[in-house]
């Protein structure tokens, strides 16, 4: 049997498994090999290679290894819990981006934080036993028999179609698709992190289970680093910082509907002002469309069939209307309101559009997951020969934007969903090809994300990476040949005929709410001086002698359109300086005898202990240059651990 390995044909014996191939290629690899891929499908290391194809070993430093290790560790934890609480009922235990969890029904027992060390100790015991993790394919009847005392697994098995597999280690077995590490000895460095509640299958009508979160790594150093990052993330939680800095609040009278507080609204207005200026420079016309539009519009666009369960509806004059969940149909109506020539294209329409979508209460999370949010949408209507140029321009724009906020990113091409899409497959293939070529022409690498396109077209998703390595979905570019067809959009071509434009949906920041949540955590609240709510805090040492000069400075800075506050409270200076630091104010100005006598200011920049004395004019020149250049106050990559 021949396998394609690193572009070469390699002969292997029939019935060989992944470990056999690893030994054949390089005996040293068997120490690092944990699984293998055949034609991009993952298999356990000791599963036989059943067909010819493209073969690739998954080593413990491969991208897939972290997920496989954590999935295996969730089973090890379940095995330990079963030994400690034999009556516990197990549901699902997947790997997630930052580790794993398992949802468990402990019956009448309430698991406590004190129990976690006991679980870890038992896990280490099973790890040292080096029990093989063995996959077995079973019939649905046998699976139902094996799990007859577990109603959760029984419910899952009844829903399964096709091959059913279980994994065994020692006397423990679990229903699972896999893939897993070869034995429990591979699982050495782990931590059970926390407890939470979770409803079975996410439905609040079902029983609440105990969710146990954990993390597993290939080395103690990596485990310690990741745990330290998680502790740092808790300090940077945008909900915590938002409360401390007076950015936003959520009321019980509107779950999922954020209230912007004065500081937060100032921050947002500054970012939006930058955004509007950018649209003007990039050739966009800014529009605004109604929040409520008739049901017929959403039927035409296809949103009614795909999103009606998440749409808020109302009746006006006995006619059904919906609050918009997206801005694109409104933009199309604006495009169709006038006649366009081929010379007019591309037509670029931008909108800061407020949208509403119903989210389950359990999914709501600060500014990250809300029920109303503002999308920085834009829709570009262009000819096919303009597509590559427009997409390249957008990629350049996104690169500028994310760099400005200290964020790295990667691009994913999300292709046609397996079902529920509109339009022909030929149209989809053509659209996907155009996006690929535009990425390549821009010199940008991208990853294929199969089946995750919008129902009306493929898209480029921009995954932002913050200073802690966490990934956020924010920006997107969607290529749409379907909605213009549904709404009969057209332009007059050179020969006088009507032709359909191609539509690009563009959201750079995505949700303004979500984006502000992301940068709050990325900067830990130390926003760049150009957009931060308060830029300067003036602190007179003694009001009797220094307040009059401080007030003059305040008026001068206000006249220069700087955001400044004067703290003339009678609190001790050290206390007031500390408050300015807590509020992450870029410049704290301490005004004492020397400053009054010499007409100077002494400033301390956030993140620095150094105090610098300069003339007022020098200070104004410095801070205005910093604002103009939109420099970062702190480099988030250097400020982390």
Image (cartoon, rainbow, N blue to C red):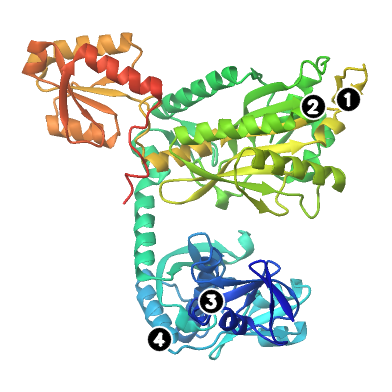
Q: Nearer the viewer, mark 1 or mark 4?
A: 1
- CB of mark 1 within 8 Å of CB of mark 2? yes
Q: Which mark is residue 125?
A: 4
* Residue wearing tag 3: 33
Q: Which residue shows up at 78% across the image and 23% down it? A: 333
Residue 551: where, in percent of width, then height? 20, 12
Mark 1 to mark 2 CA distance (whole Å): 9 Å
Residue 37: where, in percent of width, then height? 65, 71
* Residue wearing tag 1: 499
- Element type at marker 2? loop
- CB of mark 2 within 8 Å of CB of mark 4? no
Mark 2 to mark 4 CA distance (whole Å): 65 Å
Q: Earlier in the sequence, mark 1 or mark 4?
A: 4
Q: Nearer the viewer, mark 3 or mark 4?
A: 3
Whether residue 510 is visible here, answered yes or no, is yes
Q: Which mark is residue 383?
A: 2
């Amino acid at each position: 049997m021949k396998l394609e390995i690193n572009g070469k044909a390699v002969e292997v014996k029939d019935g060989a498994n992944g470990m056999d191939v690893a030994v054949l290629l390089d005996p040293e690899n068997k120490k690092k090999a944990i699984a293998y891929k055949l034609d991009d499908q993952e298999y356990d290391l000791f599963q036989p290679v059943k067909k010819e194809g493209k073969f690739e070993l998954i080593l413990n430093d491969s991208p897939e290894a972290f997920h496989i290790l954590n999935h295996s560790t969730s089973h090890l934890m379940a095995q330990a819990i079963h030994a400690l609480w034999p009556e516990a009922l197990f549901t699902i235990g997947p790997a997630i981006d930052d580790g794993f969890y398992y949802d468990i029904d402990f019956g009448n027992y309430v698991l406590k934080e004190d129990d976690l060390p006991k679980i870890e100790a038992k896990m280490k015991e099973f790890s040292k036993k080096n029990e093989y993790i063995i996959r077995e394919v079973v019939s649905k009847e046998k699976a139902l028999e094996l799990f007859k005392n577990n109603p959760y697994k029984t419910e899952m098995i009844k829903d399964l179609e096709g091959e059913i597999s279980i994994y065994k280690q020692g006397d423990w077995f679990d229903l699972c698709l896999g893939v897993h590490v070869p034995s429990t000895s591979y699982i050495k460095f782990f931590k059970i992190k926390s407890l939470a509640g979770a409803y079975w299958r996410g439905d609040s009508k079902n029983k609440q289970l105990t969710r146990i979160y954990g993390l597993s790594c290939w080395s103690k150093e990596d485990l310690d680093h990741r745990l330290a990052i998680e502790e740092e993330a808790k300090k940077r939680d945008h909900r915590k910082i938002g409360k401390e800095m007076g950015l936003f609040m959520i009321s019980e009278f509107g779950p999922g509907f954020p209230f912007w507080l004065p500081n937060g609204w100032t921050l947002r207005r500054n970012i939006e002002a930058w955004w509007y200026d950018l649209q003007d420079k990039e050739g966009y016309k800014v529009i605004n469309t109604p929040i409520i539009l008739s049901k017929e519009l959403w039927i035409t666009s296809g949103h009614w069939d795909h999103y009606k369960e998440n749409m808020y509806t109302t009746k006006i004059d006995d006619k059904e209307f919906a609050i918009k969940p997206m801005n694109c149909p409104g933009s199309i109506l604006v495009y169709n309101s006038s006649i366009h020539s081929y010379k007019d294209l591309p037509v670029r329409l931008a909108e800061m559009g407020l949208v509403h979508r119903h989210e389950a209460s359990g999914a709501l999370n600060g500014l990250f997951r809300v029920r109303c949010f503002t999308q920085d949408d834009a829709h570009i209507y262009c000819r096919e020969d303009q597509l590559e140029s427009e997409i390249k321009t957008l990629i350049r724009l996104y690169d500028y934007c994310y760099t400005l906020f200290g964020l790295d990113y990667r691009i994913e091409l999300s292709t046609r969903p397996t079902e529920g899409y509109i339009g022909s497959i030929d149209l989809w293939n053509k659209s996907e090809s155009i996006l690929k070529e535009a990425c390549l022409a821009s010199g940008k690498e991208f990853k294929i994300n199969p089946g995750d396109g919008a129902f009306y077209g493929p898209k480029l998703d921009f995954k932002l990476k913050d200073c802690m390595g966490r990934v956020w979905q924010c920006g997107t570019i969607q290529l749409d040949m379907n909605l213009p067809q549904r709404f009969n959009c057209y332009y007059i071509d050179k020969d006088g005929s009507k032709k359909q434009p191609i539509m690009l949906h563009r959201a750079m920041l995505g949700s303004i709410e979500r984006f502000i949540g992301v940068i709050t955590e990325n900067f830990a609240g130390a926003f760049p001086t150009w957009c931060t709510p308060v830029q300067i805090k003036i602190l007179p040492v003694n009001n009797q002698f220094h307040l009059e000069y401080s007030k003059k400075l305040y008026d001068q800075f206000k006249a220069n359109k700087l955001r400044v506050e004067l703290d003339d409270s009678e609190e001790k200076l050290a206390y007031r300086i500390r408050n300015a630091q807590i509020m992450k104010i870029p410049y704290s100005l301490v005004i004492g005898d020397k400053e009054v006598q010499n007409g100077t200011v002494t400033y301390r920049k956030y993140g620095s202990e150094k105090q610098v004395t300069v003339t007022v004019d020098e200070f104004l020149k410095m801070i205005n240059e910093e604002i103009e250049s939109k420099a970062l106050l702190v480099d988030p990559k250097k400020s982390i651990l």
